[in-house]
Amino acid sequence: MNRNNDMNERELERLLEEHFSSGAANAPPTPDLWGQLESRLGAQDPKPLWAVLRDVGTPVDGFRFAPALAATAAVAVVAVAGGSVWFAVGTSGDGGVLGMAEVEPAAAPVFGTPTPEATMADAPGPAAAQALEEQEEQEEQDGALGAPGVPGAPEADGPDRSGRPTPEAMMEAMPAPTPTPAPVMQERAQTSTAVPAPPTATPGPQSMVEGVAGLPEQRSTDRPGATTFQDYERQRLTQASEDNVSTFSLDTDRTSFQLALNWARAGYRVDPASVRAEEWVNAFDYGYAAPAASDRFAITSDLIAHPLESGRYMARVAFQAPDVVEDRPLNVTLVLDASGSMSEGNRVAIAREAADAIRRSLDADDRISVVHFSTDVLHEYTVQYAAPDHRAVIDSIRQLSPHNSTNVQMGLDLGVQYADTMRRERLEALNYVILMSDGVANVDATDPFAILEATSAPDGADPLRLVTVGVGIANYNDHLLEQLAQHGNGWYRYLFDEEQARETFRRDNWLALASPVADQTRAQVTWDPDAVKAWRIVGYENRITSAESFTQDRKEFAEVYSGAATTVFYELELHDDFRQQGALGQVELRWVAPESGRGWSQTTDVVGNGRVVSEYADPLLGFGAVVALTADRYSTLDGSGDPYAASRDLRSLQGLVDGLQNELGHLAAFRDFAYVLESLVRSVPPPPANDSGYSR
């Protein structure tokens, strides 16, 4: 090491050895790396520690002595430049400089989760040395060390730096090592009663559960830039003697949970404003039985003891739609965002893959139109009223690329015009307008209601159905896309990679999603005040409507597609004699038949027998309650609730998830939820310790 170094050599070596001894103990360097290091640094007097470690770490008869020390020397590459010292310890998976805290392994996850790509620090050897040489050559050309930005999150790593940093600046920029906590399962051991194997939930794409061995390190910023969510006020506990009617639109969106999963995987703290509890609950399959007839729903209800609050209960009301795939032809209009913000990350690739998956799913008697929009409509890519295998359609989708600003209204205006023309010419077809975008509207109308008003078309028995598909993390407008779908007779999905795009729109999935069984679907629960003292719906804040509107057909009420299930949870306070009162209440469902426009209704009791079901007797029921409460409690961290109370509840819920591992741990969706919950727990402050010695 250069004697002119401003930082104490032994202190630097001690810090490196302390940090890497546990994390890199099983990553011995290849023999030729030593020669490369010495040729780079030259002979030095006195001999630096890495050279000493090289000597004692050299393989002898196939045995490498002190692998932890050898690995420490491998990563502590000392480069001398102009009297200052800097450390090149590899690069992170997304191109930024990899600091010490990033090399340290994350806490062991409770359940199997995706494994991140290996970094150079994970696998030292010739490839690492070659990459280091290429990095130095590039730096010499650029004249700056600079940290490349995180894909999809511009400037997340901070501004570029000119020149090499001083040792003091580098050490200050490195986050302090974080102790690795013990596995959560050991901290919260919990036994559960053996039960029969639960119904198998539909797993998500394998990319959701393979590839990340643990949670990533928290990014330097809590959230990506320029994200837009609408924070809705949580419902309060309502006395049944004052108001005993709960009216809401059914939910068929699942986006809020997928957003949270993607944020957790990217190392961001999940934004509480992004959490819509009903979308978390309805992201999972609870194995409901199909209805007895194709023109009816299966409506079920259950009652369990409240997982968090002694003396309270939770009621689940579930609506299972019939599984009827339409054989009617489809008119599909793709409205593709070709604005500049789509250049971030892999947004264009995802949108292109989703659009082509939809095209491939269509039959010869279906018709498709394609519109690209940026500041204006890009007419050179426009295709109107073509067969799905037409060369112009294929080429238009393949040529999707980012250009200028985002005029969502102009794109939808033309898309709706094309769709309405197809609807009038093909009266027997179902009609979909599919917007694929990051939602960042910045030209003309930029709010969802203005855009919908400008693009509205007369609705008859076969309305135009507006489906929104979101892509991206940073620079993303969730509110615009969610509201366009909710008030446009459609649904909203979020895609975070190309595999998920193919999975969502593969032919069997797309045919179910494009087969509506009910339009303008809403439910009304009327509680019996003699049985129910107080009630509170979990989630559905932006889907709640007045009791008076229940009898009115409105297009903002939900479209329900083939085989869709909708679940709602209530928190309840019950009278002591509720079992003697019979049913806790009644639920009525109303909808409009998509083809005929005829109105239908269906009524049944809510928990007619007064029986309280054990969560261990039905683990999927208990799991749904945990999901609902997790989303509900975490959403209070927007500033409206007590963070320590939320922290205690989340940790208690995590213990319940541990207890469901034996019954549900084989499900990919369950493991994804456990992964997200672990991320949420890490992001909230721990509750204050009770040092008084007294019980609460």
Image (tube, rainbow, N blue to C red):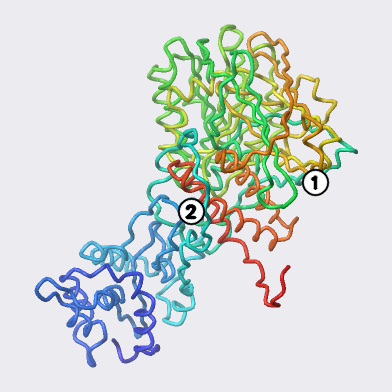
Q: Position of residue 420 (x, y in %)?
A: 62, 15
Front in this rendered view, residue 644 or 462? 644
| For residue 332, side relative to residue 595 (left or right) | left
Give the residue number, with chain letter if any, for mark 2: 266
Which circle, 1 or 2, is nearer the viewer? 1
Dot label at residue 199 = none
Along the polypeptide, which appears first: circle 1 or circle 2? Answer: 1
Q: Is residue 483 depicted above or below 216 in this figure?
A: above
Give the residue number, with chain letter if any, for mark 1: 236
Q: Could you give the CA–CA distance between mark 1 and mark 2, rounded to whole angstroms?
A: 33 Å
| For residue 195, side relative to residue 245 (left or right) | left
| For residue 572, side relative to residue 490 (left or right) | right
Q: Is residue 399 depicted above or below 275 in this figure?
A: above
The C terminus lies in quadrant: bottom right
Q: Position of residue 352 (x, y in %)?
A: 44, 33
Q: Choose top left, top right, bottom left or bottom right for residue 318.
A: top right
Q: Which residue is pictured at 81% across the width and 30% down the height?
A: 526
Identify which amino acid the numbered label 2 is placed on: Ala
Q: Choose top left, top right, bottom left or bottom right for residue 415.
A: top right
Q: How many marks?
A: 2
Q: Specify the farthest residue to the right.
A: 242
Front in this rendered view, residue 314 or 154? 314
Category of crowding for the residue at label 1, using alpha-carbon neighbours closer than 10 angstroms: few (below 14), some (14–19), many (at least 20): few
Q: Position of residue 71 (x, y in %)?
A: 27, 73
The N terminus lies in quadrant: bottom left
Q: Which residue is pictured at 54% across the width and 38% down the height?
A: 494
Q: Is residue 160 depicted above or below 473 in this figure?
A: below
| For residue 274, side relative to residue 513 (left or right) | right
Identify which amino acid the numbered label 1 is placed on: Arg
